[in-house]
Amino acid sequence: MKIYNDLTNIKNSSLGLGFFDGLHLGHRVILKNVIHCAKKYRGESTIILFNEHPLKVLTGENVPQILTLTEKLNILKELGIENVVILDFEKYINMKAEEYLKEVLIKYFSPVAITTGFNHSFGYKKEGTPDFLRAKSKEYNYLYFEVPPFVIDGTIVSCSAIRSRIRLGDFLFANEILGYRYFIEGQVIEGDKRARSLGFPSANIIYDDEKVPIPYGVYYVRVEYDSKTYDGILNYGYSPTFNFDGGIKTEVHILDFNEDIYGKKIKISFVTKIRNQMKFENSEKLIYQLNRDKAFANIYRYFLGGKFSISSKKFHS
């Protein structure tokens, strides 16, 4: 996959437009059509992204992301997209829809097809709606495809719906409408080694502040390292039992694992929340609870790997 950080000529493109945070099930339909049209009309599948969320630029407020830009690019590559063009949103914030269509999309990409979601818009005052793109398709000689809402259990699959579920720690539903498990990635850093002294050695990473925050608590997770996947128990929050003022920690105890992975990169995918963060009277009671958490993880692992599934059938153990 080729990545461009500014406008470049990619003629006969099959274009996909959107911010694509999360690359959820609705986004996957858009991408599938982009790739299909590229093959059918002998063009190149091309996705146009912005470097920052439009709302952040317009309002100045931080918009936590489901995927960082790097994570998004990695997934787009895995899905088979040929080109990704990353534009600076501020350069186009006051450009009218007609000008953006003519001077950007048509001039640089000569699209054979354009695919967007039902709620996509661009240009000054959001004039570039699906109806606008449909109305201009004959004039500029491209096919236009509008992907309708993707609905699961009465909920429209959207980034806002996913973010709200992640903020609540409801990963069962968040993952179902994402189409994969919400994850974080990071390099293992050295911690205070307190978990190791309790018999539960942990790998610490930094939770990227660009990502959607999760509630303090303990979670059953899956950990990918060196092309292998392990079960894990992740604690996110402070250390209330020991009154440790070391800030928020993201530490995962990897089950059936005993390797030194300091400095190594791991990927942690959230399966479900086990419990809220708790303060215990002493280390013995904390160890007792940690063993209960481990038992929960082992039982959950059995269901994920057996013929019964607590999670969505689209997930693999």
Image (cartoon, helix red, strand yellow):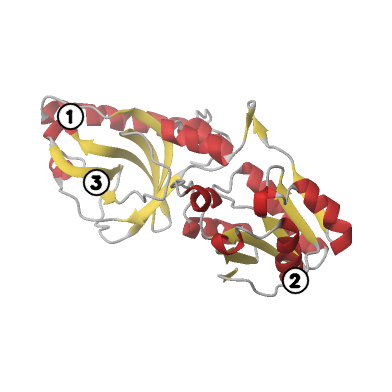
Residue hosting label 2: 107
Q: Amino acid at mark 1?
A: Leu
- The mark nearer the N terminus, 2 or 1, is 2
Q: Residue furthest bottom?
A: 9
Q: Position of residue 76 (x, y in %)?
A: 59, 58
Residue placed furthest toward the right:
138
The mark closer to the camera, 3 or 2, is: 2
Q: Residue 235, image x and y in percent?
A: 29, 38
Which of the two residues, 179 or 16, is positioned nearer the viewer here?
A: 16
Question: Which residue, given by chain and number where applicable, does mark 3 sit on?
Answer: 202
Whether residue 175 is visible: no
C-alpha distance separating marks 3 and 2: 53 Å
Q: State which quadrant residue 140 falls in.
A: bottom right
The N terminus - image quarter = bottom right
Between the residue at mark 2 and the residue at mark 1, the CA separation in whole angstroms equals: 63 Å
Within 10 Å of the Cα at label 3, are there few (<14), some (14-19), or many (20+) other Cα atoms? many
Q: Can you identify the residue that label 1 sits on?
A: 286
Q: Residue 222 location, x and y as percent?
A: 40, 43
Question: Which secondary structure lies at badge 2?
Answer: helix
The amino acid type of the residue labelled 2 equals Lys
Residue at 45% x, 36% y is 166
Q: Position of residue 163 (x, y in %)?
A: 49, 38
Q: Which three-letter amino acid code belongs to the residue tagged 3?
A: Ser
Give the secondary structure at mark 3: loop
Q: Is residue 265 above or below residue 65?
A: below
**Residue drawn 43% across the image and 43% down it:** 212
Mark toward the start of the polypeptide (3 vs 2): 2
Locate residue 151: give its quadrant: top right
